[in-house]
Amino acid sequence: MSGDNGRREVTVSDVATTAGVSKATAARALGDYGAVSAAVRDRVLAAAEQLGYRPNALAKTMSTGRSNTLGIVIGDIENPFFAQATRGAADVANAAGFDLILSNSDEDAEIEANAIGVQLAKRVDGLLVAPASSVRIDNLRTIIDAGRPLVLFDRAAPELQVDTVIAANRKGARDLTSLLLAAGHRRIAFISSIAHDGPFRRADSLTSSSVDERVRGFVETLEAAGVPEPERFVHLNARIEGVEQLARRLLEGDAAVTAIVASDSLIALGVFRAARALDLRIPDDLSLVAFDDADWTGVTTPGVTVMAQPIHEIGAEAARLLIRRIRGDGGPPVTSVLEQRLIARDSVAPPRAV
Amino acid sequence: MSGDNGRREVTVSDVATTAGVSKATAARALGDYGAVSAAVRDRVLAAAEQLGYRPNALAKTMSTGRSNTLGIVIGDIENPFFAQATRGAADVANAAGFDLILSNSDEDAEIEANAIGVQLAKRVDGLLVAPASSVRIDNLRTIIDAGRPLVLFDRAAPELQVDTVIAANRKGARDLTSLLLAAGHRRIAFISSIAHDGPFRRADSLTSSSVDERVRGFVETLEAAGVPEPERFVHLNARIEGVEQLARRLLEGDAAVTAIVASDSLIALGVFRAARALDLRIPDDLSLVAFDDADWTGVTTPGVTVMAQPIHEIGAEAARLLIRRIRGDGGPPVTSVLEQRLIARDSVAPPRAV
DNA sequence: AAGCGAACTGAGACCGGTCTCAACATACCG
DNA sequence: CGGTATGTTGAGACCGGTCTCAGTTCGCTT
């Protein structure tokens, strides 16, 4: 109606008219493609400047089919892991001229499906997804069916032939568990907040392939050390019960564990709180190791021994793979496995003599 | 060429042909607008289903002028403050049917300008910006000139008449400083990583209005307590020198401070590290208070006394204001100031007797 | 039975770019 | 000097939706 709203955007045609050339020529000058004489180009550019012309990227997408936008679907941007991975992806994307549309799935397959649908409708050139489930992959199929490139990160989907970037979680879990075993622990709990029905059994496969790998590494290492029924030490659904609550339960009573492997830094935080509440000292009364070198793990007393993941690089590499596909690489799907790195601090000690 | 790439997307026209109706009618049925008879609607929907029709949101934007996309420009998504605010904004946006395009400015005005340009070109319906500078506001003017709604958050731009969501930083700083004063401290440092030329003088205004307010609250409280030349206790550019490095410098020698106000949780982390390296105990040898209730501030020994900000709500409220503008609210610009909340833990004690 | 309004449908313009194709000018070739 | 290659320009189709407007078919009123 009034004021700014009524002002139509300046278009190529407007610029063309002002410059006294055809729309096609103006577009060539502005878009810097095709052949335009120097004189005409200057005239068009001057007219654009004068009118305050701003290109409409959507119109461009309509005719070229390329949006220069990538979709990224993660669990939760507040989770430092995803924040870092997203930043890694954003940097690579930007450098290549792409923007990022961000969606949080809250690890819910339905929300994820919806987010993917919207991203597809917005015609992103490709998607970066940390899938809520490595098993229920219809969401991901949708993307492939739509003919859009897809790269998975943090979690794989074995059933799907698609580029993937993950960390060497199984080895990481083995190393962490071995460390605890070597210190003399036999009763070690593995805690993750991943959702799972009922107690963990060895034949189960977890919805996140990365947690699944960690659990496997943990179980097989305990088993090799002769610990009977190691799967009973795997505790999932931590977020539902409450990490602190769960940790307290595991740390009290006759069958209390003497060490804990935290599947991420949020879990480690909860364990720390629980230990403090129970007046248990780390590492004297409880040894703790965790995945991810969160910034605070170095400043607690004691510092936490962690398995660091190259999180930034996971996101960056995923973006690189995706952009390669967008640019037309038709090779077979690649799985990039990045190494984890142990950072030993002071949260591990031999268990208290009984 | 071959395979998937060659497959054209299914369009409204395709669906119309299959259903045996006109494009206009098919569009009405699919878009759920206008009048369509039940029989025809079913036929169209069935055809769409059969063909695997997926709407093209960009084409829709082209004709309606609305993209249902918001732009958000922040310093760095890896900074927990921005991650939380972004999540708050994303939740509100999603609920209202909007997506978010994310850009990191790294607090650099030029990168910010570029990001804004791209977002504008992608025809976002509005922008959420935590401006890199509260003073150099040409970047923000661009948005207003383009006729797009803009909401600032975390930092204000006094020169600009625009909706803004900030926290009561000045009061927060006063309270934190008073706490330290009450414990008996007189030599208190304020540390921020904000960029600033030369030593801080009272007439200077800082590029971030929120840090500016904190500094003012800090300085005026010291002054009221009779501390001479309080501005000499303000230390900026912490990221350039390195937070830990700077903290160590302030904590050694005859003129060492006995307490520190950290302008954010990243600074607090650096101070913690420095204290540990110098073998200074908190709070016996050094008192520490900080802004932002980062998740780890409760698990260190001792826990850190902090001024918590409603970060999630800052982002959410900003998104709410923006969406209101997009929906056409033409009222005068609003500034929403959210309260901060003190969380007292154990990092403050009287200074060591000299 | 004629008249009127509501419900439904189709044709085609439009959003703002890109791109193909043809027209024309100029230069260079033998 | 005719022929061809090269450079520059314009006309108009196209991308995939929305939306206006006009036409058709009804049912219902009087």
Image: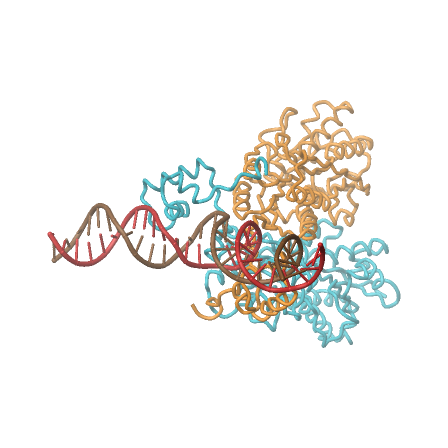
Chain colours: A cyan, B orange, C brown, D red
Depth order, front residue of A187/A238: A238
* Looking at the image, residue A280 lies above or below residue A38: below
* Residue B290 coordinates in the image, percent (x, y): 74, 40
Depth order, front residue of D16/A69: D16
* Residue B254 coordinates in the image, percent (x, y): 70, 30
Q: Residue furthest right?
A: A253
Quick check: can you spot residue A316? no
* Residue B271 coordinates in the image, percent (x, y): 70, 41
> At x 45% / y 37%, what residue is drawn?
A51
Depth order, front residue of A347/B171: B171
> At x 73% / y 26%, what residue is drawn?
B220
Label tally = 0
> At x 48% / y 45%, what residue is drawn?
A55
Quick check: can you spot residue B341? yes
The quarter of the rendered structure image containing the C terminus of chain B is: top right
Quadrant of residue B165 in the image?
Answer: top right
Query: Going by the image, does B39 lie left or right of A227?
Result: left
